[in-house]
Image (cartoon, rainbow, N blue to C red):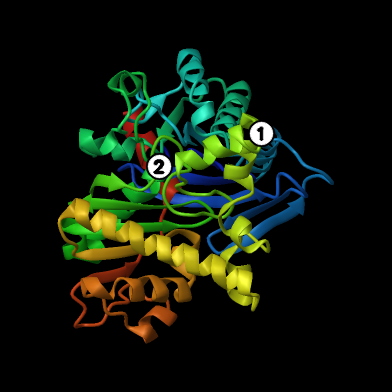
Amino acid sequence: MTAADTILVLNAGSSSLKFSVFTVGADAELQCSLHGQVAGLLSSPTIAVKRGGETILQRTLADGDISHAQAADAVLDVLQHEMADRRYLGIGHRVVHGGARFSAPTRVDARVLEELAACVPLAPLHQPHNLAAIRLLQERLPDVPAIACFDTAFHRSVPDIGQLYALPLQLAEAGIRRYGFHGLSYESIAQRLPAIDARAARGRTVVFHLGNGCSMCAMVGGRSVATTMGFTALEGLPMGTRSGSVDPGVLLYLMQQLHFDAAAIERLLYHESGLLGLSGISSDMRDLLASGAPAARRAIDVFVYRAGRELGSLVAALGGIDAMVFTAGIGENQAEIRRRICAEARWLGVALDEEANRAHRTHIGTDTSQVTVLVVPTHEEAMIAQHVVRALR
């Protein structure tokens, strides 16, 4: 490997495409050279590129919406100009759903793409965009290995009873089981915890991944033993526009009494519910916290209450708790949400240091708190880059 060898990482979301370029050193050490994203794909797409903390490029790509493949094309064009002397060793792609078949990073070929396409109904907000980016990169850089890294893989350590629904067993054998998501984020946290807090790293820890998509994961010694998301990325906590867990009888009622078809139910659960549906104002927690409207307060109240209930469930699965970790957009940046969730967890012996929380420090529990409370940024792209290096070996 030379100093010019790089790993490109693409992380396709529902309306954005994040990217990072990592330089690979002689000892396989990774250094982020460039990073950025194409945002607003569904409205007015803009690309921003940063080197360290400095923005070196920011411009609008089109007047209207563009596809994820077009966004990936634009990213490659920019990188070709900014990093013309670099050679791509491999490309890492975040893929939300690996189904029952894929439990580790996998080199992508036509057969793998076909199998991953079969998982599109299980993750309709993300899987199609993940695969669109892979196909485009394979067209433009056909000789560069593509490695798919799965959000579901981290949760394969969950015991079998934690993966099963109480449905006829032949349905589980056909793949209808709890998979869990945000695994690359949780894996990133698990990898970083030993250097941050030994108790959290080796003990019983609940991680709150709170962003536009939200989930929680119970870990013992850095391994997943339970998580709030299941067969799809709908289960568990309320999210920006996703409902979280809903009584299945509600869906039957919608079909039988209100004549909703499958498309209408999908639109309701994925795009019209969560914080947006509860508030009628916004799917963005920042907007709701800034609003004085009763509906905004109600949406936040439901979000915090549900997080507290899920915490109790995960603590039961762990048989106790040693640490709590907040990560992702809301978890890392919204002190008020952390404060309220910790208040819900007082029964566990959680005691929050209000000043440390407002300052967004790493340790935000008091010295007397029976539970260690941390704020740890997630680094999904760096985790993917590490997987690519290992896969290429």
Residue nearer the viewer, 155 or 174: 174
Q: Residue furthest top?
A: 111
The answer to whether the residue labelled 2 contacts the one labelled 1, judged by CB atoms less than 8 Å apart, is no
Q: Residue furthest right?
A: 63
Residue nearer the viewer, 183 or 94: 183
Going 51% across and 45% down the picture, which residue do you hit?
Answer: 21
Whether residue 66 is situated above or below residue 128 in the rendered picture: below
Rendered-image quadrant of the C terminus: top left
Which residue is disc 1 drawn over? Answer: 259
Whether residue 112 is situated above or below residue 374 in the rendered picture: above
- Dot 2 lies on which element? loop
Which residue is disc 2 drawn over? Answer: 181
Residue 27 at x, y percent in the picture: 30, 43
- Image mark for residue 145: none
Query: Of marks 2 and 1, which one's residue comes earlier in the chain?
Result: 2
Residue 293 in view here: yes
